[in-house]
Image (cartoon, rainbow, N blue to C red):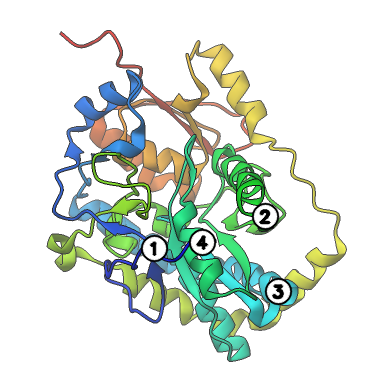
Amino acid sequence: MSMITNKPAKIGSYQEADVLFLLKDLSDVKLEDTTDNRELRVQSGQHYSESLPIEYQPPKEYVDLFWQTLMEYKQKVALCVGIVAEQIYQMKGDKAILVSLARAGTPVGILINRYIKLRYQVSLPHYSVSIIRDRGIDENAIQYITAKHPDGVLQFVDGWTGKGAISLELTKACRDYRKRYGVELDDTLAVIADPGYCTTLFGTREDFLIPSACLNSTVSGLVSRTVLNDKYIGADDFHGAKYYRELLADDVSNDYIDLIENEFTAIFTKAADLASQKKQEEIETGFLGMEDVKKIQAEFEIESTNYIKPGVGETTRVLLRRIPWKILMRDIESPYVKHILMLAEEKGVEVIPYPNLNYLCCGLIKSVKGLQS
């Protein structure tokens, strides 16, 4: 095992006790481009992790909807966090090391840690690391964690599952890591919601709105998506990210955490009971969401499954940072899709009723290759 050469960057607006980001600070590097330019480059072969989208700053009506949604579903989110936290603690106890996948996993990892601290008076180490589709996990970050905690048992954490690309990437990364370093890692991904049937460790399989999916960095500690670009990231570096200090006035990251945490004591018993029930169940995965994706790909003649993003969280991301083509909607009346309908209207995106979905909705990315003048 090599010596630790990296130092964690002091980035983000979270408290130091909540999370340590194993990321290289690229705040001074110009990585953003317009959505149109970036989409064209990505669809022409540049990897999405080499650049960043310009952070969408929503209008007041949308932010108001975020708060309304958060107030409505804070106890539901708290319960799902509790169910996951109870399972982790039952399986791994105080040897657990929480490793959130940046950035959607970071607030979830913080909430799981706060739950366990409140319930069991145990404070677990919590790191946030980068994993990138088709490029794997940040092995320098994993080496840092395993060197710091030789007796620890890693638990990877994310927000939700879509079609399962990150779950599969994590499994491959853990397999590669074992071959390279002889260290066995648990590739079970802990998530609040698993509508894609991609993991056995989840709070619910309902495709519901996790409020932190509604916003970008302003609910994720003001940290950007992670970056892996050879111009800025050397062989011994952690993957990179930016800290958007200029958005501090709009930051709700810690408010979000505190509001959910305040619900924990009310759901302790129910969360523990439901977690215990899950231990008795035979939980299958099956990646059922890919059936939807393949069907949609054929029906709409879509070149790549990468242009199909199923689930409430992923559909939201399409509208926030990609060029959306169409939104397929199983139930337009669902309270979980109000923000999606608002964004679709703002951006002039067609919403198509599509009743036979496993998910509540699905975002389709527009193919822009060949459209440049």
Q: Residue at x 47, y 38 (%)?
A: 135
Local packing at callout 2 (Cα closer than 10 Å; few below 14, some 14-19, many 20+) is: few
SS at badge 2: loop
What label does residue 22 carry, if any?
A: 1
Which residue is disc 4 drawn over? 143
- Amino acid at circle 3: Lys
Q: CA separation, marks 4 and 1?
A: 11 Å
Which residue is disc 3 drawn over? 92
SS at badge 4: helix
Whether pointer 1 and pointer 3 mark residues with C-beta atoms closer than 8 Å, the reply is no
Q: CA separation, marks 4 and 3?
A: 20 Å
Work out whether residue 110 can be spotted.
yes
Q: CA separation, marks 2 and 3?
A: 21 Å
Whether pointer 4 and pointer 3 mark residues with C-beta atoms closer than 8 Å, the reply is no
Q: Is residue 314 above or below residue 301?
A: below
Q: Residue at x 55, y 26 (%)?
A: 354
SS at badge 1: loop
